[in-house]
Amino acid sequence: MNEHGRLADFLQARRGLLRPEDVGLRTYGERRRVPGLRREELAMLAGISAPYYTRLEQGQSRNASREVLDAIAGALRLDASERAHLHALARAPGRGPASRPRPERVSPATRALLAAFGNTPAVVIGRRTDVLAWNRQGHGLFAGHLDQDGPDDPARRPSMARLVFLDAHTRELYADWPAKARAVVGNLRLTAGRHPDDPLLAGLIGELTVNSPEFATMWADHRVLACDVADYEMRHPLVGTLTVTQQTLRSPQGDGPALVVATADPGSPSATALTLLSHITAPPETPRPRHDTDTRTTT
């Protein structure tokens, strides 16, 4: 699907979420064939003509001005992330064939930053949610049931999106799994808007849509969510229940891998649980070489 097809789906889905009474419109009790606002009602709220909005929603009008898009965003009551997503979808399609996706790698600087977190769980995530690297604590917290060296092999790299929707262990890990799932879908929506020609990303979305009814339902409502900081209650099989704050740190350009860090309130039972997890996942100590004591005596 091209950008304008995505734009049409997004506008239709978000228009369907608004009721006339939500925006102060009277319906006078008439029966409506479909839920949500009609096209002409949304156009009126945005201050543009109904024929123009219809052409835009149907992909027949391109290069809408920023002012028009902002007016539509205001009428749809989009937040900042959703507004940015709308602008990304409305961009004119690029010319020429799509470029081949470049392999995602972890730079030496990012690896040094990962190591600097020490006993704090941390994971480096690519834009398609592939785990590019993790420290021992990050592996133990998020996916201790998988091979620790999985991220080193591109063919075996775990995908956080796949884990959340298709892995039973990860589903049980989050006490409020739907909240975590919505965050994954919302971030994938933003990424798909920024990278509409990424075939690997499209393949991931297609796979999840086919194999997870929950993902298909969440993806269909076109909600966008930039989830960079969130608290999650986790039910860990080794250290029990704990609450962590997951923070996603991105480069200013926003086009490189992201670092996800999990922390807990100092002195809390959750912080104690993370410390315990650090001890459990620590590598075994190497035995010190034994030096035999010289028992010979001088005569």
Image: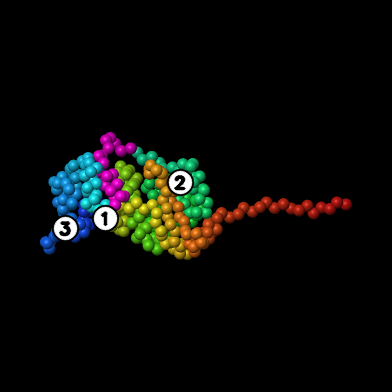
Secondary element under disc 3, as helix, strand or loop, is: loop
Q: Please say whether residue 150 is visible from this viewpoint.
A: no
Work out whether mark 2 precedes mark 1 in sequence or the reverse, and give the earlier one: 2
Mark 1 crowd level (few <14, some 14–19, many ≥20, 10 Å Cα): some
Q: Is residue 26 left or right of residue 286?
A: left
Q: How many angstroms separate mark 2 from mark 1 (CA)?
A: 34 Å
- What residue does disc 2 label? 153
Secondary element under disc 2, as helix, strand or loop, is: loop
- What residue does disc 3 label? 25
Q: Is residue 117 left or right of residue 182?
A: right
Return the x and y of residue 110 as percentages of the image width and height.
47, 44
Mark 3 crowd level (few <14, some 14–19, many ≥20, 10 Å Cα): few
Mark 2 crowd level (few <14, some 14–19, many ≥20, 10 Å Cα): few
- What residue does disc 1 label? 221
Along the viewing direction, whichever of 210 and 3 lies nearer the viewer = 3
Q: Is residue 7 left or right of residue 150?
A: left
